[in-house]
Amino acid sequence: MIGNTGKLAGRTLFISGASRGIGKAIALKAAQDGARVVIAAKTAEPHPKLPGTIYTAAKEIEAAGGQALPCIVDVRDEKSVSDSLEQAVSLFGGIDIVVNNASAISLTGTQYTSMKKFDLMHQINTRGTYLVSKLALPHLMKGTNPHILNISPPLNMKPRWFKDHVAYTMAKYGMSMCVLGMSEEFAEHGIAVNALWPRTAIITAAMEMLGGKDISPQCLKPEIMADAAYVMLCRDAKAFTGNFSIDDVILKEEGVTNLDPYAVDPSVTPMPDFFLDAFDDAIADPKVVLQNTTKPAEEKAAEAASGETGKLQQVFNNIAPHITPEVVEKNNAVYAFVITVPGEAQPQKWYLDLTGAGGCGPGEAKGKADVTFSLKADVFHKMFAGELKPTSAFMSGKMKMKGDMSKAMRLEGLMNKMRKQGL
């Protein structure tokens, strides 16, 4: 892990969304240097589902050795942002660093994305980032080694990163386009503008809401992002700007190659995150066994089809005992599987109903499916054997999905839990 150098001592950081998750982790890392942190977030009162407020975060920052200014800020509101910046300048004397971390997410396709969610993501992610950067600019011009750091991905224009959640990708890429443009625009003022994105999924409250708490073993802790951000914010602003950095790459440049200390569970390979070209390499399945190619294709197809229905039935037989009232209440979703079997002209349909009394088996569920997975039989078996993560199968194109991405991610957590219990 990255040790503190003291380079941020006495510096003032304005961090949006710093009451929890990655934003708070960056704040705590800076606090260990004795930095001053403006906690710009909406949560003033305890949330029923999300931990932490701006005031609890402030206590942690002060305990870590820093100074804190908790501010109730809605990055969609210009006056709210402006007032918080003026408070910070009045108390701390200026602004040296801005971290645009606040973000909203909805991993849904166009049909399933309400305009309310669309507006929320664009107002917080793109507009909020632009607004905070714009209003902080006059103060950053007077700052010491001034930086703007956006928690956003590299701009990857491959359609695969758009097709399943167009609205979210547009909103996050809006943050990244701010980096692309502002790094050039602000260069004459010596202000660095960079982006930072994780190689893997990071366990945060948002991730748990999307995938459930059972998904946490497949994630790394927010501290990996905090350490990478710390390295970037300590670099010379005039020499290091316009970069779309990845957390583990930054750490490797500093000599850190063992990421186990950041793992929630070091024995589990972390789930890769979106938007990276290296995603395909990360999810490559080394367990694939080469097929015997000496037999005619027709014969191999017939052998594959023979007994396949029985194999699928056995998987669902193993799932059935795990459909408990607790699991149903927690997931509240209907999953449909359209499975292509070698040698069969039409795909087989199976379902997993985690609503009401629950159930699973061949055919279609009585209720409308929240998520429909389309995949080949071998991919299905690898998923339920734990050899291939559903998220990896989806993002690599081995499986197609329609519906609610957050409920799809919950299924991944449920599958992990079922395997631990003997699926």
Image (cartoon, helix red, strand yellow):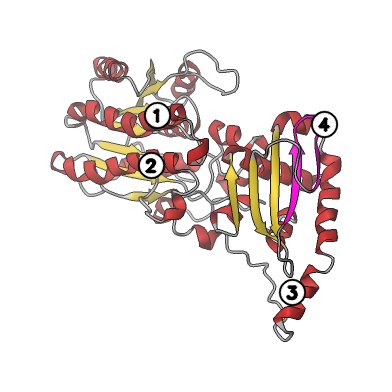
Q: Amino acid at mark 4?
A: Ala
Q: Which residue is mark 4?
A: 357
Give the answer, above or below, for where 415 lies relative to 22: below
Q: Nearer the viewer, residue 217 or 90?
A: 217
Q: Which residue is mark 2?
A: 170
Inter-mark Cα distance, 1 to 2? 11 Å
Query: Residue 326's x, y, as percent?
Result: 78, 30
Per the rendered image, the range of residues in magenta is 348-362
Q: Residues within 10 Å of mark 2 (few under 14, many from 20)?
A: some
**Secondary structure character of the magenta stretch overall:** strand
Inter-mark Cα distance, 2 to 4? 39 Å
The first of marks 2 and 3 along the sequence is: 2
Q: Amino acid at mark 2?
A: Met
On the picture, is 128 further left or further right than 290?
Answer: left
Q: Amino acid at mark 3?
A: Ala
Q: Quadrant of residue 203?
A: top right
Give the label, 2 or 3, closer to the camera. 3
